[in-house]
Amino acid sequence: TSDMPSGVGDTRTLRVGRTVGVLALQGAFDVHRQRLEQLGATAPLVRTANDLDGLDAIVLPGGESTTMSRLLTTSGLFDDLKGRLIDGLPVFGTCAGMILCATDVLDGRHDQRGFDLIDLTVRRNGYGRQLDSFEVDLDVDGLSDAFHAVFIRAPFVERVGPDVEVLARHDGVPVLVRSARCTVAAFHPELTDDARLHQLFLDSLTD
Ligand code: GLN
């Protein structure tokens, strides 16, 4: 309409209105919230089923996937969140969040549950004790300069399904991948000031 500022209608302007929830039961959720808000998104913390209302997407942060699985179950959030994800709510999962999204988890706890969203086999803590945490510069599809990635007891991607797109690898191993509505990173993109992967995720949201 006539009172809209110029630029309304380009994707950058539309993106500002996004509401991206951040699962906040455990782990590194607050920095994700900061990155998203820095980019103009609204980023409410998600702890109950009511918090899912009105979300355009959700971030599943790093932390401890077994603990998150347990808290998702005891809080009653698991089934409602799974329902929204199956209905197509876009998700960005990092580290433990990647584990929660993968179809196949090796070295998981026997009672650990996940959302079966992306055809991947991941091994928990698969980089081994010698490499508990490490940092590398990654070439990422869609970014012109390297992204500095922090890995902390990261999952090791052992298999990628045929419909999964690999956006970055480290030593040949996929570390950032996506399928239709699910983007997952083995590392912690929220732990540096670089918000470009959050921006890529926001850019990927379509109506
Ligand atoms: N090793 C953790 C797990 O199994 C993930 C570590 C992380 O998120 N930094 O959930």
Image (cartoon, rainbow, N blue to C red):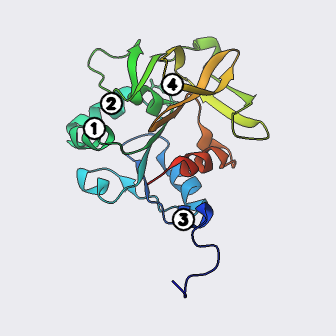
Locate residue 39 relative to residue 72 in the image: left or right: right
User: Which residue sits at x=31%, y=31%?
Assistant: 69
Quadrant in the picture for the C terminus = bottom left
x then y, percent, for residue 14: 54, 65
x then y, percent, for residue 176: 59, 29
User: If you read the primary sequence from the N terminus, does the residue marked by circle 4 or circle 2 appear first?
Assistant: 2
Distance from disc 4 to disc 2, alpha carbons, whole Å, reads 16 Å
Identify the mark at residue 115; answer none if there is no mark. Answer: 2
User: Mark 4 sits on what residue?
Assistant: 164
Is residue 64 positioned above or below 79 on the image? Answer: above
Distance from disc 3 to disc 2, alpha carbons, whole Å, reads 29 Å
User: Which residue sits at x=58%, y=51%?
Assistant: 203
| Most foreground residue, 87 or 80 | 87
User: If you read the primary sequence from the N terminus, does the residue marked by circle 3 or circle 2 appear first?
Assistant: 3
User: If you read the primary sequence from the N terminus, does the residue marked by circle 1 or circle 3 appear first?
Assistant: 3
Callout 3, which amino acid?
A: Leu
User: If you read the primary sequence from the N terminus, does the residue marked by circle 1 or circle 2 appear first?
Assistant: 1
Is residue 201 positioned above or below 11 on the image? Answer: above
Q: Which quadrant would residue 128 be assigned to in this image? A: top right
Mark 3 Cα-neighbour bin, 10 Å: few <14, some 14–19, many ≥20: few
Query: In the current view of this chain or complex, which residue is farthest to the right?
Result: 145
x then y, percent, for residue 97: 45, 33
